[in-house]
Image (tube, rainbow, N blue to C red):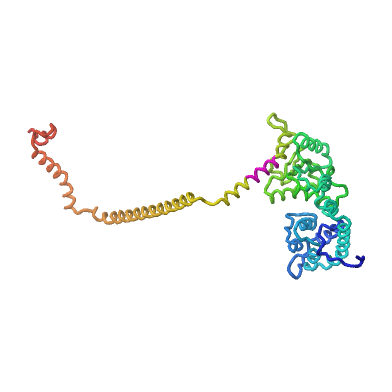
Amino acid sequence: MTICEKIDLSDIPVSALRPASKEKLCAMLNFNLVIPSPSGLPRDWRGLAQLLNVKPPCGYMPNPTGHILCQFEKLPNSTLDKLHKAFGELDRWDVFDDMDNIFQTDGKNYLQVVQNSPGNSSSLHIDFLTDDIVTLDDLHRAKNNQPPLIYDAFVLFAQEDEEFAQMTIDKLEKEYLAKVCYKDRDFIAGLPLEHTGVMKMLEERCHHLVVIISNSFIRSEFNKYFLNFAAAVGIEQRRVKIIPIVLEYCPDLPSVVRFCHLLDYTRSSKLYNFWDKLGQAVAQSRVSRTVLEHSTQRLMLEDIKPRSTNQEKKISQDESYSQEAKEKSLRKEEQLWNAENYFQQKASTGKSSQEPSPKSSDKKREKPGKIIKSITDAIRKLPKSKLSKKSKELACPSD
């Protein structure tokens, strides 16, 4: 293969790009442009995410193009040819021309490594999948053909609080057996775009972000950015992502932790053990993850499990009972409505009859006397042997 001969980029994966090539590409696409492409897509990283079928980053991110490339590498058939053609569809011919020679150079280097080391997949993984290798542990695991390590927590703090941070890391690792990531100790030296590595760890490789909050921490824009990023990731993943530690009194706490349960290092109480609460909060990720997997599997099995005939009969019976209850309630409402109309009509017709004439009122006055007389006559007709003492007095009154 001659130097001027071009290679087919459809055979070259995106992971073959060198860190310097990615950095140059990100510098050209990270800025938001106002004028869209002829197809209506934004002519920056937003349009690139749509063309590559990649979810764009949520919230503000200093290197969104790097995030998109990292996600695109995980997809099948993620080649340099597909990425190169996307620049043309975005009407970014400046990027298309500038990256053409770079893609060709990186592609040729990739093919040379493949030819010189056939079957050596572990070395190929280390040379080109640099986005997945962030820490020294990743480097050792890649040599043994193992996947990257998942950490329990990533510790973020200000440089002035390094002594307390080191004590916190030692406590978590030695007493609570937690896997902790600390960038100054664990990151590979010379890692390009360090902030991209931190974001990758927070989003994909660390269950929690342990934040040591102090006045020095609040003054750092670098730390506040990663704190906000972790809060957005926690909302997207629906999990408790941030574990805030208050090292000293801070009048202006960051808004994302202001209403969280804070671990106050300055607090002293017999019922409050700072280190136990911190260790339990970090270790709960392993327990909650296992419980969530088991509960999800159980719910899926219950959804898939077919209904038995008894369950179907019970459901049909419940439906018939509910239908009968509805009919009964409707009949009862109809009866009540008819009765109400009847009494209303009765009341309206009775008003006129309640104003009697003088004759009818006289008859009403005579009624009690007639009733008493009829009762007395009936008693007199009865045999005296069957009458009580009171009845005899009524039947035969003494003069």
Quadrant hosting residue 327: bottom left
Q: Position of residue 8 (x, y in %)?
A: 84, 66
Q: Position of residue 55 (x, y in %)?
A: 72, 58
Q: Residue lying at the far top in this picture: please name it.
A: 270
Q: Can residue 221 be seen in this snapshot?
A: no
| Residue 287 falls within the magenta-colored stretch | yes
Reply above or below: 294 against 77. Answer: above
Instruction: Report the side of 126 relative to 312 (left or right).
Output: right
Location of the C terminus (image quadrant): top left
Q: Nearer the viewer, residue 181 or 228?
A: 181
Q: Can residue 122 be seen in this snapshot?
A: yes
Quadrant hosting residue 149: top right
Q: Residue lying at the far bottom in this picture: please name it.
A: 38
What residue is rendered at 11% in x and 41% in y? Answer: 378
Q: Nearer the viewer, residue 60 or 319?
A: 319
Quadrant hosting residue 342: bottom left
| Residue 129 falls within the magenta-colored stretch | no
Q: Main secondary structure of the magenta part?
A: helix
Q: Position of residue 66 (x, y in %)?
A: 80, 56
Q: Position of residue 306 (x, y in %)?
A: 54, 52
Q: How many marks?
A: 0
Instruction: Report the side of 34 relative to 397 (left or right).
Output: right
Question: Magenta segment range?
Answer: 284-294
Q: Residue lying at the far left in this picture: please name it.
A: 399
Q: Residue lying at the far right in this picture: please name it.
A: 3
Location of the N terminus (image quadrant): bottom right
